Amino acid sequence: MNDSALVARALGGELDAFALLVEHHRESVFRLAARLVGPDEASDVTQDAFLRAFHKLSTFRGESSFRAWLMRIAHNAALNALAHRRPVPVGEPPEPDPAESRGTATSSAPAAHLEASERRERLTLKLGALPPAHRSVLVLRDLEGLSYEEIAQITDAPLGTVKGRLHRARQELIELLRNNTYDWELPR
């Protein structure tokens, strides 16, 4: 069943229809939240976004896709969480994940798995160093694959601003990664 039909059913009082919308979009919302606020707060932001969406479902006009509307709510929830957070210094290492230290990986090459895991952690730190507006457009476009128009709706910014922010975000991320060429092997 498509999102429009589920929204109509949810507006008619069917909670199961909204539960299906949650199930269908949970991973996208969580990924967006995790990339904007980090994995530790992503569950809270995801829950907050769906709660807000449920309470504001009657305001959904269908001018854009339900996914774009929901991602805008998730984006705003993530920015609110960032605004209420104490800043963390960029060079501070993340706390180790207990699940990874228990050796849950079954890779035949533990060193390769560890290296890939460390690269993901460093990339997450580098993404966190970008200004929230730049991080948002980068995550929405390059990681979530949304169109420029959808990103403009989600971030409530003109299309030209979205394109400019994305260009600057990519340049900033490349520069941050170049500062550690050993890890990323980027040309200077």
Image (tube, rainbow, N blue to C red):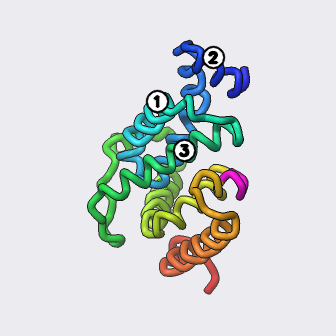
Q: Residue at x 54, y 79 (%)?
A: 175
- Dot 1 surroundings within 10 Å: few (below 14), some, or many (20 or more)? few
Give the residue type that dot 3 points to.
Answer: Ser
Q: Of the residues under marks 3 and 1, which one precedes in the sequence?
A: 1
Give the residue type that dot 2 points to.
Answer: Arg
Q: What residue sits right under mark 1 in the picture?
A: 55
Rendered location of residue 75, percent (x, y): 51, 50
Rendered location of residue 111, percent (x, y): 48, 55
86, 99: nearer the viewer: 86
Contact, mark 1 vs mark 2 (Cβ under 8 Å): no
Q: Main secondary structure of the magenta part?
A: helix
Q: Marks 3 and 1: which is nearer the front?
A: 1
Left or right of 179 in this view: 1? right
Q: What residue sits right under mark 3 in the picture?
A: 108
Please provide the residue range marked out in magenta.
Answer: 146-150
CA–CA distance in space, label 3 to label 1? 48 Å
Left or right of 86 in this view: 137? right
Q: Residue at x 64, y 69 (%)?
A: 161
Name the residue furthest bottom: 188
Q: Of the residues under marks 1 and 2, which one precedes in the sequence?
A: 2
Q: Residue at x 63, y 24 (%)?
A: 7
Q: Residue at x 34, y 72 (%)?
A: 91
81, 173: nearer the viewer: 81
Left or right of 122 in this view: 2? right
- Dot 2 surroundings within 10 Å: few (below 14), some, or many (20 or more)? some
Q: What residue sits right under mark 2 in the picture?
A: 9
Q: Of the residues under marks 2 and 3, which one precedes in the sequence?
A: 2
CA–CA distance in space, label 1 to label 2? 15 Å
